[in-house]
């Protein structure tokens, strides 16, 4: 199986970085100041927050950004492992020449596609936007020679296709 990553994954991560890190860093820099205290011949630089509320908003945004990116990485890996687990060989023609494409839709669920490069069958796989676990699998195109026609457009759980893949021809 080959895994491809759709542009929506990168666009999602870039948007996340822009909306969390950019204002976060700006808040930290804008609402923090330094004062130099002079005590006799000693000088001491003390930092203080000109607006603690805005300063901590910045801390929150940056933390939120870091957690979200780690979480996106976890979801991505989970989707990838799930596709490999269930579609490393085509359930219809048993070829290992399958292509899984991972995308993020930024809604509750994400939709992944798996296409068999050997027989032409194609599936749409709904994964949880929170965990990357497979929710349902739907065959959207049977093989070029018509195999799998009877399962077309039916939403099934992934085990159904895994058990077909295990069956001997
Ligand atoms: Zn196939």
Image: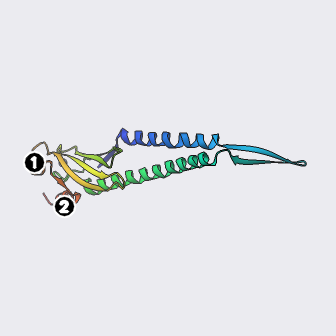
Q: Is residue 134 left or right of residue 21?
A: left
Between residues 80 and 134, which one lies in front from this camera angle? Answer: 134
Q: Is residue 65 left or right of residue 120?
A: right
Q: Earlier in the sequence, mark 2 or mark 1?
A: 1
Name, please, the residue furthest toward the right.
40
Whole-percent x and y of residue 65? 50, 47
Give the x, y percent position of residue 103: 33, 44
As measured in the structure, the alpha-carbon distance from the residue carrying label 2 to the one carrying label 1 is: 17 Å
Label annotation for residue 149: 1
- Seen from the viewer's position, the closer of residues 12 and 19 is 19
Determine which residue is flagged by label 2. 163
x and y percentages locating residue 159 in the rendered image = 22, 60
- Asked whether, in this view, residue 100 is left or right of residue 154, the answer is right
Q: Residue at x 54, y 39 (%)?
A: 22
Element on which disc 1 rests: helix
Question: Camera-side residue: 72 or 119?
Answer: 72
């Amino acid at each position: 199986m080959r895994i491809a990553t759709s542009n929506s994954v990168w666009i999602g991560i870039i948007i996340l970085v822009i909306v969390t890190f950019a204002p976060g860093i700006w808040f930290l820099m804008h609402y923090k100041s330094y004062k130099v205290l002079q005590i006799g011949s000693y000088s001491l630089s003390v930092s203080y927050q000109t607006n603690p509320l805005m300063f901590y908003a910045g801390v929150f945004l940056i933390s939120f950004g870091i957690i979200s990116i780690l979480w996106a990485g976890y979801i991505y890996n989970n989707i990838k492992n799930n596709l490999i687990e269930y579609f490393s060989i085509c359930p219809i023609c048993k070829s290992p020449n399958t292509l899984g494409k991972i995308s993020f839709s930024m809604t509750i669920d994400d939709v992944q596609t798996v296409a068999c490069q050997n027989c032409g069958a194609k599936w749409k796989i709904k994964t949880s936007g929170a965990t990357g676990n497979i929710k349902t699998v739907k065959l959207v195109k049977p093989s070029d020679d018509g195999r799998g026609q009877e399962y077309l457009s039916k939403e099934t759980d992934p085990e159904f296709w895994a058990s077909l893949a295990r069956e001997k021809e």
